[in-house]
Amino acid sequence: MDLTALRGIGDKKSKDFKRLGISSVSDLYNYYPREYEDRSKLKNIVDIADNNKHFFIWRISSRLYQKNFGKMTISYVYVYEEKSEFGKIRLIWFNDRFTPRRLVRGREYKFYTSVSKKNAFYEAGNPLFCDIDDDEIGSIVSIYPLTRGISNKQIRQFMGQALAYFDKREEILSDNILEEFSLNKRCENLREIHFPTSIANLTEAKSQIKLVDLLKDLCFLDFLKKMTKFSQDTHLSYKIDNILSELSFTLTRSQRKVLEEILDDCNSPYTANRLLVGDVGSGKTIVAIVVMIIFALNGYQSAMMVPTELLAIQQFEKNIELFDKFNVKAALLTGSSKDKEEIKKAIKNGEIDILIGTHALIVEDVEFYNLKFVVNDEQHRFGVSQRQMLALKGEVVNYLTMTATPIPRTLSLKISEIIDLSIINELPKGRKPIETKLLGSDKIEILYENIERTIKENRQIYVVTNNIDSDDKNSLENLYGIYKKRFPQFKISILHGKMKAKDKEDILGDFNDGKIDILLATTVIEVGIDVANANTMIIYNANNFGLSTLHQLRGRVGRGEYESYCYLISDNPSPSNKLNILVESNDGFEIAKKDYEKRGGGKILSYLQHGKNLSTVDFLNMSKDEIEKCFKIYERLKDGNYQGIDLTYVEEYFRENKRIILN
């Protein structure tokens, strides 16, 4: 049902909601709060012994006063509380002439505010208030991520309407299964999540939503796997030790184990469909490259799709010497490739064994001669349909998906029983932890001294920011001017996504060759860039990035034999700053979990990424008990041939899409 079916939502408001990813009524009631405020407990001032916000009921006892102090406007009224020490309480608003005008003298209102003691009265600054019969105060209130034109109060008002139109097709479990495992209906859990009746009920509702969403994923995975099991006659002949001896380093035990799992899959009577998980810098890509070489040596074509042009260039150039050692023909194909037609012709004729590229690989006129193995790097950057389009370029294709998104061990052990899951759980030998420091903007001079010393030791430096040419003092253009002035003796270059492909390629090549000392860049270097001589990462406006993105950026250094450093620049380097999580940990899973906790309970990208219109699942924050209960129900359903779960729309999805990539 379209969002405009709700009373009060027209075309303009609908466009506002689309910025939040909400286009339908179902999108709205599945839009989870990021946090909650418990405004349910009514207090008197005499009961308050802290500076936290509390719920009060006060009667307005004076007229509204407004005073100007230069550019500052102060509006205030008085209320009276009989039991308080002074009785009189002043409610004050700063630079807000209009909000307090809604208050009527002699009328009672609900207030949610903190209170401080002044000389002869109490004072409450910028208090929230509502009418006595309004539930905005006096209940547990859900707080949502917002956008321009959408207030929290509006979302709550529209949410009530949306829940009345709950789509019963989303209720996938039968009443018998719900009763057997003491589960509430999904619509009841959603109502509790948006309009909590108690903390205990809210906690249980959130737990059940997560559990059933994961259960749905598990059942769909198992169901779909049976429907997408393709016979193949691919035969790979290889001597793995001979191939690995050509590498300039030794694979870790974990890499070797994963490599053998993938090859065994690809050499089986059925096509491989495997998910490879490994932290930043764990060496996932070289495993995939070795598999691609083995396919090429056996007369089959391979393709690797990566999310950015810069990463495609990096992966191609980094491995071209290795391809040459085996006389394997490789090519690079991106949207900016000048020789596209020649490359496409060579691919179609079987003259290219390995193709590395971006979304350009899945355009209609790219045809392969004998494609048997495809790799999707950083799978969360691509949609399901894009991943399927690449696999459909061949008749019967083995598929490998790679991601740095961590999965908790408890869950990964369980999921591996259903899908083909490989995990690289160690870093390459000699890889040292990266020392991370949080620096205030006022400590930049200390940083400059470290930069100078680092470059004099013949090391290289990344400097990353989130803006290119804005008014921000830390934009790429402004930082370039600052660094050129401060370090005129060093070679400094800029790299960002808006540059021409040839310019990006030249700059990346020069940085690889050590011709650039300081590379100023945006997050285009977030994934895949691998320069062993670069040992320092400096990130400006660090608070504007998510922790997982910062961890990815930090992973660009520490790839050589040198001690490596990451400096996070912030205007607020306090002990409570979220950036201290990175200072204290190099563990990708712990950082991702903390990132979730900091951002609150919004939707998180599903790691399995296997379906269309399937609910996302927060795997990171599931307890062991929740996971165990989920798999208990899953086994019960599976043993009963899925009696008790509605698989209607996964069947529709399969009929609509002839090939489904499970991971």
Image (cartoon, rainbow, N blue to C red):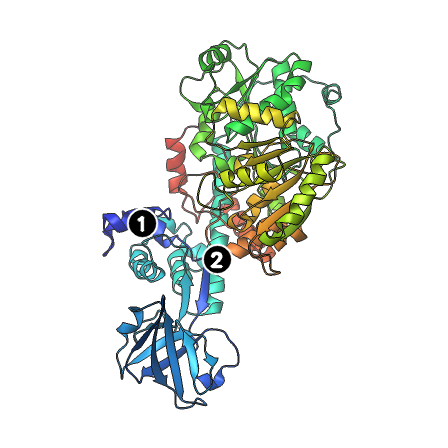
Q: Quadrant of residue 320?
A: top right
Badge 1 crowding class, 10 Å Cα cut-off, few under 14, some 14 to 19, many 20 or more, is: some
224 relative position to 492: left or right: left
Sequence order check: which comes first, mark 2 or mark 1? 1
432 and 183: which one is in front? 432
- Answer with left or right where residue 143 lies relative to residue 631: left
**Image point 47% across, 13% down: which residue?**
339
Between 43 and 662, which is closer to the camera in this rendering? 43
Tell me which corner region of the image, top left, top right, bottom left or bottom right, holds residue 132: bottom left
Whether tag 2 and tag 1 are in contact, CB under 8 A, the answer is no
Q: Position of residue 297 (x, y in %)?
A: 64, 14
Percent coordinates x, y for residue 234 in the rendering: 58, 18
Q: Nearer the viewer, residue 451 or 501?
A: 451
Q: Position of residue 86 (x, y in %)?
A: 43, 89
Query: Where's residue 208, x and y in %?
Result: 48, 57
Q: Name the mark on residue 537.
A: none
> Is any atom of residue 374 visible in this view?
no
Q: Secondary structure at mark 1?
A: helix
Amino acid type assigned to the residue bearing label 1 in the image:
Asp
x 48%, y 12%: residue: 348
Q: Which quadrant holds residue 65?
A: bottom left
Q: Which residue is mark 2?
A: 208
Picture disc at residue 16: 1
Type of the residue with mark 2: Gln
Q: Which tag is nearer the camera, tag 2 or tag 1?
A: 1
Residues at marks 2 and 1, CA–CA distance in whole angstroms: 30 Å
